[in-house]
Amino acid sequence: MKFAIQINSAPWESQACETAYQFSRASLTMGHEIVRIFFYYEGAYNGLRWMSPPDDENPLIRRWSELANEHGVDLTICISAAQRRGLLEQSEAKRLGKSDNDLAEGFRIAGLGLWVDACLKADRLLVFGA
Amino acid sequence: MKFAIQINSAPWESQACETAYQFSRASLTMGHEIVRIFFYYEGAYNGLRWMSPPDDENPLIRRWSELANEHGVDLTICISAAQRRGLLEQSEAKRLGKSDNDLAEGFRIAGLGLWVDACLKADRLLVFGA
Amino acid sequence: MGVLHLVNRSPGETQALAQCLDRAGEGDAILLMQSGVYAAMKHSALASRMEQSIRKVNIHVLAPDLAARGIAAEEVMKGIELISYEGFVNLSISHGPILSWN
Amino acid sequence: MGVLHLVNRSPGETQALAQCLDRAGEGDAILLMQSGVYAAMKHSALASRMEQSIRKVNIHVLAPDLAARGIAAEEVMKGIELISYEGFVNLSISHGPILSWN
Amino acid sequence: MKNFLFVMRQPPFQGSRIRESMDMIMTVAAFDQCVKILFLDDGVFLLKSNQNPDNPDLKTSTPLFAALELYDVEELWVEGESLAERGLDPSHLILPVRTLGRTEIAFFLAKADIVVNC
Amino acid sequence: MKNFLFVMRQPPFQGSRIRESMDMIMTVAAFDQCVKILFLDDGVFLLKSNQNPDNPDLKTSTPLFAALELYDVEELWVEGESLAERGLDPSHLILPVRTLGRTEIAFFLAKADIVVNC
């Protein structure tokens, strides 16, 4: 079975990202495929590289990146959602004179077409978060 | 009359920041004082410098900065809320090897003590956002 | 001095208004703003509870938020006062403390 | 194939569950998760509506979210099935499309 | 080709929510998929006529819905009960819509391949 | 010295919400202000006993409430009706609390200088 996942919530405001992560892990373990995890609306904030919570709290960001590393899951953040909120795509960042890479490991920034593409390739779309 | 304002919402998820801004403008016009606008929880995202919404949408960020410029309003983002979410305070940013300034004009990052200070100096606290 | 209650969600979204009406006391004021202004309409799901509360609590609605949503003054329940942002500031002075029912 | 409805808020917070129960049809499944699991408790505000719905809709609750909140299996209404994340994945396969009532 | 159903249950003026939802809808339409929109609960307020923020920063989404026709998105459905509970009927709306009864919603949802709450 | 009243109406596990709220409370306490906490509506679930996520990333806030005593925050109030509507009574809670009736809430709120919903 092929799943497309959409995440609409910022990482620290709810349990939505956590549930999406656990669902993704479980489905991969069961041998299913995650076509893509697409971050939209407030979900774009998941891609900020510099999240630095207190030591005793595990930043979800590292676990997303692990999912990408270990299972090759495609983590795509919508470009317009990201730029609106202050996370710039690389060429735009360069144009504005930024030098840091603010995108967390394993994420990429791309257009909504990839969301449609995931919906078309998957058997199911699951939407997590407000 | 002295007001302390607390903002808990990210800029694009609700009307909360808009209402807080209009309240602040109105109270300043009427001759009242805004002791401080303190950004907490998801409100920390208001300080991200690089918000780039479509041209026909006015980024609230510029209006916060205007409020700081024109009226000297103190815009303080909670340091722990900001760092948790990926907006680093300057010395921490340096320590991690970042070179850009990611904090929007007119904002500063500081501790919760300034929130208490605002509550103690003000006649009223108003909290906007989820 | 009564408490000022801020309600920014409609009764079709959350329980916030119902929960606020359950607690607001004599002399308190309620300000409906943002999506909360839908509760000021005559046909709101909580219309009868609002009518009961109007007898003891002063209920206000932020006029610019009504206008933005296409709600005409005639659509608003009797007994609810339309106010501007200046009115909001004045309510924050005449009442306190202020509680947001988010 | 029935629809899978995801409900992640408690009836004490939002109208989402009530609105979902109003629309879920025969053969649909509902999964209560996150704060939505509070609605699985025998004493929830919507208990009687839940009982009615259980006759036509399959209602499930995410067990790890129950445990996190200190809700024992005995506190859950009869007729609601406890499932794991694997069970959630299986529900997403046996039902479709999937609607989140956020 | 898949059947996409967008379910709108949120009232207007929730930040950029509707703008971003409409971007999704227009992108799906540009991919020549079948698109329907269903307005439920407070989502029907999106279509209320006379929305007019005098505040330039609080943009109404009304023109976005009017533009849907250009993208051949013409199937706008509203639940009658959601309107009635809010004292509205189709004549109060900015656009012509098709009406469904509450008991028809389950079947209507089940017919879609992809349902997106927005 | 001011009277701060923190009103907790949200259930647990809303991201870092409670942790950040507790930071506020502890900071106010460190400034030697008078601190009360009132649990209303779903906020009473914060105090439900036996909370135990086996998931290490979903931390329970129970220890944070237990630590309040160290900060001399001892006035924890719960609305009896909020408990009863959820099938709970004070014996189901992790900490001893004082109970208020619904009709007493308005007066209780009015006595505070600063009310913070968290």
Image (spheres, coloured by chain):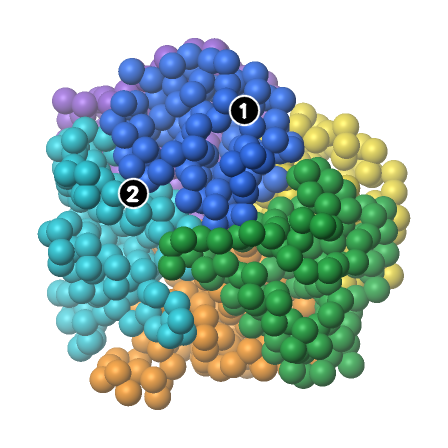
Chain colours: A orange, B cyan, C blue, D yellow, E green, F purple
Label 2 resides on the chain identified as B
As shown in the figure, which amino acid type bears the numbered disc 1?
Lys
Q: Quadrant of residue F78?
A: top left
Disc number placed over residue E39 in the picture, else none:
none
Label 2 crowd (10 A; few <14 / some 14-19 / many >=20): many
Label 1 crowd (10 A; few <14 / some 14-19 / many >=20): few
Which is more toward the observer, A28 or B127?
B127
Q: Residue at x 76, y 63 (%)?
A: D97
Q: Is residue E61 above or below residue B127?
A: below
The mark lying in front, picked from 1 and 2, is 1
Q: Residue at x 29, y 72 (%)?
A: B50
Instruction: Measure the C-alpha gap from mark 1 to mark 2.
Output: 25 Å
Which is more toward the observer, C84 or B78?
C84
Disc number placed over residue C78 in the picture, else none:
1
Q: Is residue E77 above or below residue C90?
A: below
Q: Quadrant of the N terminus of chain A?
A: bottom right
Q: Residue at x 67, y 53 (%)?
A: E93
**Mark 2 residue element:** helix
Q: Residue at x 61, y 51 (%)?
A: E48
Residue picked out by circle 2? B23
Q: Is residue C28 left or right of residue E75?
A: left
Q: Residue furthest front?
A: C74
Q: Position of residue C18 (x, y in %)?
A: 55, 27
Q: Quadrant of residue B30?
A: top left
Q: Is residue A62 visible?
A: no
